[in-house]
Amino acid sequence: MESNDERFRKFKEEIDKEIDERRAYNKLIGNAVTISVCGALLGIIPYLGWLILVFGFCYCCYAFKKTLSGIAILSLIVSALALFLRYIYATTF
């Protein structure tokens, strides 16, 4: 039979694990949004802009796949839109 101390320790470990998972989840979404916005702003740099946009799009896809949240899909849309506009700009001018 478990003592109260052992049950409390297990409960505390479970709570700590959930808190760490939530922090990682929030950090992943925050990074996706930051990379998406920075990619959209830095995408106008010649030659290097393509690399930044593609990296941002891939990272946003990864974040969306891992989290399936609304903010992740918003960052994915922003990144895809920036990549599309860069393509239009590169082919027309």
Image (cartoon, helix red, strand yellow):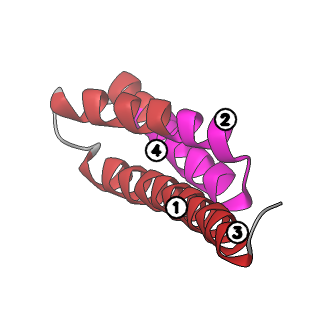
Question: On the image, which quarter does residue 5 sit in?
Answer: bottom right
Q: Residue 20, which numbered label? A: 1
Magenta stretch contains residue 82: yes
10 Å neighbourhood of mark 2: few (<14), some, or many (≥20)? few
**Foreground label between 1 and 4:** 1
Q: Residue 82, which numbered label? A: 4
> If you read the primary sequence from the N terminus, does the residue marked by circle 3 or circle 4 appear first?
3
Give the residue number, with chain letter if any, for mark 3: 11
Residue type, numbered disc 4: Ala
Residue type, numbered disc 1: Asp
- Element marked by disc 2: helix
Residue type, numbered disc 2: Lys
Q: In this view, does 1 lie above or below 56?
A: below
10 Å neighbourhood of mark 1: few (<14), some, or many (≥20)? few
Q: Are marks 3 and 4 in contact (CB under 8 Å)?
A: no
Q: Which residue is drawn at 47% across and 51% down?
A: 32
